[in-house]
Every structure is written in C-alpha cells, then in structure tokens.
Image (spheres, rainbow, N blue to C red):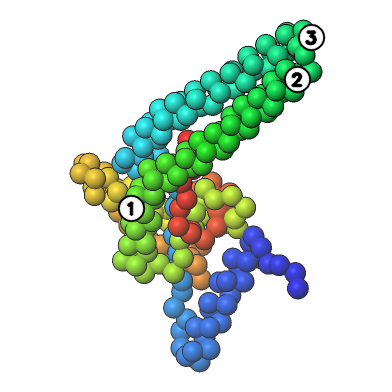
Amino acid sequence: MARVTGVAATLALLATWTAAAQAQQPGAPVVPLRIAYINSQVILANTPGRAAAESLFAREMVQWRGEVQRLQQQLDSAVAEYSRTSVVMSPTAKTAKEAELRQLEQRARQRAVELDQQSQTREQELTAPIMQRVNAVIEGIRAEFNYAMIFDAAAQGGALVTADRVLDISPLVIQRLQAGAGAPAQPGVQPPLAAPAAAADSTRPRPAADTAGARPATPLRPRRP
C-alpha cells in the first residue's frame, strides 16, 4: 500500500474527520473543524529563558571543545615526535612507542565521545523545561479555544503550503509565555478567529502566510544552537 504523505495526508485526515462526524449523526449539520497554526521558530526566539539557556550552553561547549582540541594537539605532537625520532629507535622502542600512541589516540577518541554525550545531556537539561512550558501553553490554547488541530508553519516536510494569517496563534502563545515569565503583555493580541476548515469565508481576500512546509503541530523539540 502506498504511503500517504504531505498534502494528501492532511486532506485525508480532514475528510476522515468530516465523514466520522456525519456517520455519528446522519442528517445533522457537520460542525466544521477549528484549526490554527504556529511558527515554532518565532515562538522559540521569543520564549523567555531560551536565550540565557543557549548562552550558557555555548559557554560550556567552548570548554568541552577546548578539552578535545588539547587532547588532539597532544596526540599530534606525540605523533610528530615519533616521526622525527623513529629513525634512530630500536625495534623494541618503536613497538613500545607505537603502542603508546595507539593508547593515546584511543583515550582521545573516547573522551571526545564522552564529551559529546555530556553536551547532549546538558542541552536537554537546559532546554527541556523551556520546551515543556511552550508545549503546555500551546495545548492550553488549543483546549481553551477548542481547536481540533494546530499546524506548525516552521516544520520541515509538512503538508500545509499557505494559510490565512488570521489563523496564526504565535503572537498569543508568545504573549502567554512572556506573561507567565513576568514580562509585560503585548497590547492588542487577541485569539485568532480560527475560521473553520470546512466553512472558510471565501468572499473577501485575506493575506496569505508563508507557511511552506507546515504540518500538524507535535510537541516542539529543542534545536541545537
């Protein structure tokens, strides 16, 4: 069976939802879906605490990279010294030195792997609370305004090509994140009209959002700085 992806997947999801509603109550009017979208990149760029977390992580990464570089420099120096002096070494001395170099190389590689794992763990520690707050706010808005689906306009490989900017709830998400952090609320930010997918007003033009590559929103994941 062919895998349904992209626009076809979204259309199939909407059609399934509508058909299910009609099947439950034959003859009754179908309640159209309430949908909205976000731009996760814009939201994360304006999330309180994210910049500080990225700055701290970047400083720690400098230290870890410095340690890896020092280990590599030690190995390079030892190899260069061996290349310079090996011509006068006895076979026994050569064998011993080569074994020493292999051990030094192994320790350097092992430490590089350890530091990489440590950096990933540290990044998760710093970003996980931020991502949890963002996802909690998005889910809260979805439940409050009874949205059936929320798309992410910044996602890659998604289905949505363009959308009415009135459906963008990113400013509302940012406002609530900043208000929760004690920042002044942005004036004039209102919940979007969330025009239903099956009953959108086509009688007047609306500006289209650049939402190429959007897909139904899933919990946001931290992006490496």
Q: Residue at x 47, y 81 (%)?
A: 30
Q: What is the quadrant of residue 80 in the picture?
A: top right
Depth check: 21 or 143 in front? 143
Q: Secondary structure at mark 1?
A: helix
Q: Is residue 20 visible?
A: yes
* Residue 32: % across, % down: 46, 74
Circle 1 or circle 3, nearest the eye: 3
Tell me if mark 2 has few (under 14), some (14-19) or many (20+) residues whose alpha carbon lies within 10 angstroms of its own.
Answer: few
Q: Are marks 3 and 2 in contact (CB under 8 Å)?
A: no
Q: Secondary structure at mark 2?
A: helix
Say which label, 3 or 2, has the lower sequence index: 3
* Residue 136: % across, % down: 34, 58
Q: What is the quadrant of residue 55 in the picture?
A: top left
Tell me if mark 3 has few (under 14), some (14-19) or many (20+) residues whose alpha carbon lies within 10 angstroms of its own.
Answer: few
Q: Secondary structure at mark 3?
A: helix
The amino acid at mark 1 is Arg
Q: Residue 133: give its label.
A: 1
Circle 3 or circle 2, nearest the eye: 2
The amino acid at mark 3 is Val
Quadrant containing the N terminus is bottom right
The amino acid at mark 2 is Thr
Q: Residue at x 44, y 78 (%)?
A: 31
Q: Residue at x 33, y 53 (%)?
A: 133
* Residue 47: % across, % down: 34, 43
Query: Image check: 179 left or right of 38?
Result: left
The residue carrying mark 2 is: 92
Say which label, 1 or 2, has the lower sequence index: 2
Q: Residue furthest bottom?
A: 26
The residue carrying mark 3 is: 87
